[in-house]
Image (spheres, grey):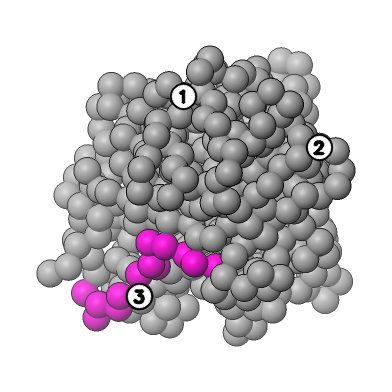
Amino acid sequence: MSVIHNPVLRGFNPDASMLRVGDDYYIATSTFEWFPGVQIHHSRDLVNWRVISRPLNTASLLDLRGVPSSGGIWAPALTYCDGIFYLMITTVMGRRGVFKDLHNYLLTASDIAGPWTEPLYLNSSGFDPFLFHDDDGRKWLLNMQWDFRKGRNRFAGVIMQQFSPEEGALVGPVRTIATGTSIGVTEGPFLFKRNGWYYLLLAEGGTGWNHAATLARSRTIEGPYEYDLEYPLMTTVDVPDHPLQKAGHGAVVETQNGEWYLSFICARSLPGRRLSPLGRETGLVPVEWTEDGWLRLAGGGKAPMLIVDAPNLPPCPFPEQPATDHFDDRELNVQYFTLRVPASEDWLSLTERPGYLRLRGRESMFSWFRQSMVGRRLAHFRCEAETCVEFEPEHFNQMAGLTLYYDESDHFYLRVSHDEEAGKHIALTTTRLGQYDEPEGAVVPAEGWTRCYLKVSVDYEQVQFYCSPDGADWQAVGPVLDLGQLSDEYEGKLGFTGTFIGLCAQDLSGTMKHADFDYFKYAGRDS
């Protein structure tokens, strides 16, 4: 019998919304400030997954310029009814202090691969929207209610309002249907119906170490909802050494054979440290119904297992992505994202020099607007990434290279540049909690290097950058750095994303000097 190895979606794939349509399974995950918005993954066996759609893929569908880090697209919710896929999204435009400037939209498509409709605005009362399709044909929007007022519970409960497809708007009264359990911080509603009961699966405890999933039910959609007396359904709060921490925020599906599975988000920590630089990932576990109509994790307990039984479905593997991308295609591979803005010909080209990724330098690594960066998720605690760049900078305002990037406040950057003293050179720069630094001695002369080979090696928390003139003779650049810095939790940081490995270029003089990257190689090793 085949098994599921958790996490099934590795490296920064949070807020999993799972759906089955016929023999096909889909999971939508959050993308925050990275573009395109929303990743939809596809499987036929719950073991093997691939990205099948990234719905918010044009500037007209999604404008993230100026959106703060860990803002942007939060917690998509994917549903299906009468041949139509429905996708709810929250776009968070601001998250400063007690306020959340956010907007909830609905997109639809007859094919999961798209095209998707223009986002339809519905409300701004809170995040984590979910659209429920009832048996009587009515549709209901659920979302958590945000309350910024002093002395109030910020997570003020789950509210519900009817959605009219004919009017393209919410109609009727707004009802509060759930305020959560004693765990608190109630969000992430997922509503489904079984045997005459409306079941409301909730995320509680916040997305950190206290995260949990709880279940409530009611005979009517408006409630009142009663909570499972043995709540939560899932959590790792009592097992701090468990390999899958922060477990919660779930959705359930029933297989064609009557088996039930729960998707959830989790995080893997660095050994001995409460830091998770890979971000929040997605896992799957089987669940079972009790005689009195409540869900339990198969095998007992409340913590998800690393390895669980897969459903009784025919295996359906997908071709693996090659380790090295030679940039021979006319469009970026699906593994890549850009930062806040779409990949457009004014700053990125795969055709001007076939076989190369050409990036035109724009704003700095601190910008929330016009960065020229292409990145992929860090998905392993042990890996190497390598590239080769051809770049002839003329002064210190022109840079290009390889980065490990959490956000503008925390990243490492090995870049090719030029100055009046060192000439063309390769140097390591670091930014920690917003403070830029150039480690002493982390400069390698590169005059006469037509091609600059750049590499980073990650071995759990240890990060070491290298450079070479020929791709064979490698030289370490700078000190060993701490991968733990690139975590949601680092020094009290309140972020929600994960580490990306990126190729980027800057030209702070405004002349958009270009850099040509010959290939990008990522080789991860499971421990």
Q: Is 393 situated above or below 31?
A: above
The circle on residue 478 is 1
Disc 3, disc 2: CB below 8 Å? no
Could you tell me how far apart the alpha carbons at marks 2 and 1 are, in whole angstroms?
24 Å
Q: Amino acid at mark 3?
A: Phe
Question: What amino acid is labelled 1 in the image?
Answer: Gly
- Going by the numbered disc 2, the residue's amino acid type is Leu
Q: Residue at x 70, y 66 (%)?
A: 349
Q: Which residues are magenta?
A: 312-327
Closest to the observer, 306 or 493: 493
Residue 349 lies within the magenta run: no
Query: As drawn, is 32 to the left or to the right of 290?
Result: right
Given residues 316 and 421, the one toward you in this image is: 421
Question: Compared to 513, does 71 lie above or below?
Answer: above
**In the rendered view, does 74 fall on the left or right side of 96?**
left
Furthest residue in direction left, as rendered: 1
N-term-proximal mark, 3 vs 2:
3
Tag 1, which secondary structure?
Answer: strand
Q: Could you give the CA–CA distance between mark 3 and mark 2, rounded to whole angstroms?
A: 42 Å
110, above or below 46, in the image: below
SS label for mark 3: loop
Quadrant housing residue 241: top left
The residue tagged 2 is 508
